Image (spheres, helix red, strand yellow):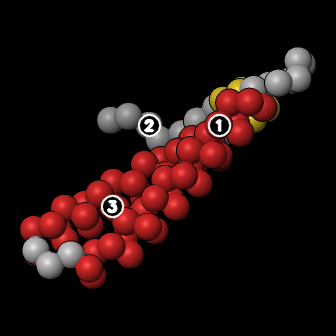
Amino acid sequence: MRQLTAPDAIHVSQRFRLTLESAILDLEAAAARDERVVPQLENADHQRRQKLLVAGQLDRAFRLRELLSRTTLRPGRAA
């Protein structure tokens, strides 16, 4: 059985961290927009697929937030 331990910090550049933060915000904004569309869809299958899209976007944003929480800025050179 694999032992669950706290992962080591991931050293990233300021530029990469900003890109990651931007991607998270974009995914969350897209999910909010797409969720507002669901009630307007008449077909139940379209609604189901739209909800799956939203769930996928939020899941991806959550995983990126977890990754972001493990990052630390690389010392040294500026971005």
The residue wearing badge 1 is: 19
Element under disc 3 = helix
Q: Please report whichever mark, 1 or 2, sits nearer to the chain's N-terminal start.
A: 2
Residue 66, position as x, y percentages in the image: 55, 48
**Type of the residue with mark 2:** Gln
63 relative to 1, above or below: below
Tell me: 27 left or right of 51.
Answer: right
Q: Residue at x 10, y 68 (%)?
A: 45
**Type of the residue with mark 3:** Ala
Question: Which residue is more in the foreground, 64 or 38?
Answer: 38
Residue 10, position as x, y percentages in the image: 66, 29
The residue wearing badge 3 is: 55
Tell me: 31 left or right of 5.
Answer: left
The residue wearing badge 2 is: 3
Query: From mark 2 to mark 3, how far is it between C-alphas?
Result: 29 Å
76 relative to 56, above or below: above
Q: Quadrant of residue 70 in the image?
A: top right
Residue 62, position as x, y percentages in the image: 49, 54
Q: Can residue 6 be seen in this view?
A: no
Q: Is residue 21 visible?
A: yes
Question: Which residue is more in the foreground, 35 or 73?
Answer: 35
| Pointers 3 and 1 in contact (C-beta within 8 Å) | no
Tell me: 22 left or right of 40.
Answer: right
Q: Please report whichever mark, 2 or 3, sits nearer to the chain's N-terminal start.
A: 2
Element under disc 2 = loop
Q: Residue at x 43, y 48 (%)?
A: 60
**Type of the residue with mark 1:** Thr
